[in-house]
Image (tube, rainbow, N blue to C red):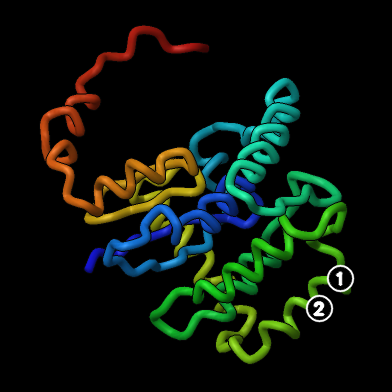
Amino acid sequence: MKTIRFYFDPISPYAALAFWRLPEVLAGRSYAVDYLPILFGALLKANASKGPAEIPAKRDWTYRQVLWLARQQGVDLRLPAAHPFNPLALLRLAWACAPDGLTPSRWVVERLFDHVWRAEGADPNDPERLAQLAQQLAPQRVADEALAKQRLREATDAALAAGVFGVPTFEVDGKRIWGQDSLPMLAALLDGDPWFDGPDWEAVRSVPVGVVRA
């Protein structure tokens, strides 16, 4: 059985869409999933990049596309009150629900994505809503706040060291697949498609950089 490392941040609607669709895409395959909450903003900072919702011309398109994709998937995605937002409280809550040496369960992760992307016009960081979510997850909580912060930092640092640059990212046997639209590629990797061990996977590294923008 293969293990998928699923790097995500609940701030990402693409990560939510990938999460909801993953069981359908991988039906009939033998796999386990380790859900790894990481801070997307730290990935952007480390790579001197911006998220799609931080680029004015791209922002409207991003929301239109995710709403259309949700419609195609048959899921009821709703935009929050404001986006981007600070996801630290949700990420730390996720790690607070992870037993020592393990990652959060799918049930916990589903509650986080529902909290952000199933409540139209709601603020993910509204204190009352956060308290309700914490209460809902109370039976799952096993870590104190300081430990949850530490585990989030460690997971994000490890993701950066592994070469993760965005969410959602799926990792199987050291190979990383990025993006909600790459789920068919993930399925092929799990099925042992020989392409992944062929020359093309590594050959891309040898393509020279033609120009560097100042």
Q: Quadrant of the N terminus?
A: bottom left
Q: Is residue 214 left or right of residue 163?
A: right
Question: Would you say the residues marked 1 and 2 are in contact, meaning their CB atoms lie under 8 Å apart?
Answer: yes
Which residue appears at 61% of the width and 33% of the height? 50
* Residue that label 2 marks: 131
Instruction: Pick the residue in front: 212 or 67.
Output: 67
Where is residue 134? Give x, y as percent: 73, 80
Where is residue 153? Give x, y as percent: 52, 63
| SS at badge 1 | helix
| SS at badge 2 | helix
* Quarter of the view holding residue 95: bottom right
Q: Is residue 57 left or right of residue 24?
A: right
Q: Amino acid at mark 2?
A: Ala
Q: Amino acid at mark 1?
A: Pro
Task: Count residues near mark 2 (Cα–Cα under 10 Å), then give few for <14, some for 14-19, many for 20+.
Answer: few
Which residue appears at 75% of the width and 85% of the height? 135
Disc marking residue 37: none
Q: Residue furthest bottom?
A: 139
Instruction: Classify 1 as above or below 146.
Output: above
Instruction: Classify 26 as above or below 211.
Output: below
Q: Is residue 53 left or right of residue 181?
A: right
Q: Is residue 72 left or right of residue 213?
A: right
Which residue appears at 62% of the width and 65% of the height? 91
In whole angstroms, how far apart are the C-alphas of marks 1 and 2? Answer: 6 Å
* Quarter of the view holding residue 70: top right
Which residue appears at 39% of the width and 8% of the height? 211
Where is residue 60? Give x, y as percent: 75, 28
* Residue that label 1 marks: 127
Instruction: Pick the residue in front: 87 or 5.
Output: 5
Task: Count residues near mark 1 (Cα–Cα under 10 Å), then give few for <14, some for 14-19, many for 20+.
Answer: few
Where is residue 208? Give x, y as percent: 26, 14
